[in-house]
Image (cartoon, grey):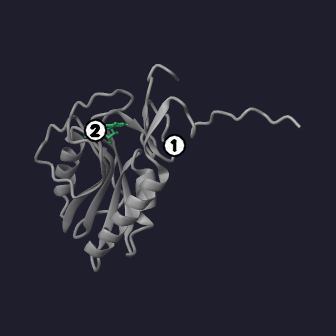
Amino acid sequence: METAPKAVTEFSNPNIDVMYSADQISGRIKELGRQLTAEYAGKDLVLVGILKGSVIFLGDLMREIDLPLKIDFMAVSSYKDETVSTGDVEILKDLTNPIRDKHVLIVEDIIDTGLTLTRLVEILGSRGAASIKIATFLDKPEPRINKELKVDYTGFTIPNEFVVGYGLDAAGRYRNLPFIGVVKDPSVA
Ligand code: 5GP
């Protein structure tokens, strides 16, 4: 019996080099979850996910934090479909609930120049939270413009490469890849 040729799927895309596999990611997120569980015990914790890139990280991370936490989301304009950061942050969707007296953990996909997060910390910092910290899945320190930005929890520190997958996109695509990878040839659709 003839078998159909194996399809090249989004998950086995030959145009993507894997940087961190799904297994490596889940191992690291378990570690972060244990750390956060210990550090936020007894505190009124709200995870604030920054749409859309953080959704996978937030979904996995929250299930590794063994505490009665809540979640909320913000959407801000940063890269849109381009690959340069302007530093202007426009709030496209604000939080649903107040954060006064809450311990806020901002959950971000990746920090690059740090300009988006700098502005977000300023915006949320004026709302009376008990504390505001940052958890980022990836940290790319090389292009950082705001060197003072304090990143409290990091999944992986990576070189200055444009990565996709695990929530991160290139012009809207690749967010569903279960790993983090680098697009080899960006001209290939
Ligand atoms: P920053 O203000 O730190 O320069 O921008 C952070 C945002 O830029 C991230 O939330 C993400 O949307 C986007 N970004 C930065 N680096 C990358 C990257 O390597 N890959 C992807 N897909 N997005 C990135």
Residue furthest to the top in view is: 187
Closer to the camera, 21 or 148? 21
The x and y percentages for residue 159 are 28, 38
Residue 129 appears in the rendering: no
Tell me the SS state at disc 2: loop
Identify the residue under disc 1: 177
Which residue appears at 23% of the width and 46% of the height? 117
What residue is disc 2 on?
A: 159
As drawn, is 138 to the left or to the right of 27?
left
Look at label 1 and name its amino acid.
Leu
Q: Can you tell which quarter of the image residue 1 is in?
A: top right
Q: Quadrant of residue 142?
A: top left
Quadrant containing ligand 1 reads top left
Q: Residue furthest right?
A: 1
Q: Nearer the viewer, mark 2 or mark 1?
A: 2
* Mark 2 residue's CB less than 8 Å from ligand 1: no
x, y percent for residue 145: 15, 37
Give the SS element for disc 1: loop
Quadrant in the rendering for residue 7: top right
- Seen at 48% across and 51% down, the residue is 22
At a point 32% along the width and 33% down the height, the residue shown is 161
| Total numbered badges shown on the rendered structure | 2
Where residue 82 sits in the image (x, y, percent)?
A: 35, 26
Residue at the extreme front: 1
The answer to whether residue 178 is above or below residue 87 is below
Ligand 1 within 8 Å of the CB at mark 1: no
Above or below, 115 against 50 in this view is above
**Tag 2: residue type?**
Pro
Q: Which is nearer the N-term, disc 2 or disc 1?
A: 2
Q: Is residue 28 visible?
A: yes
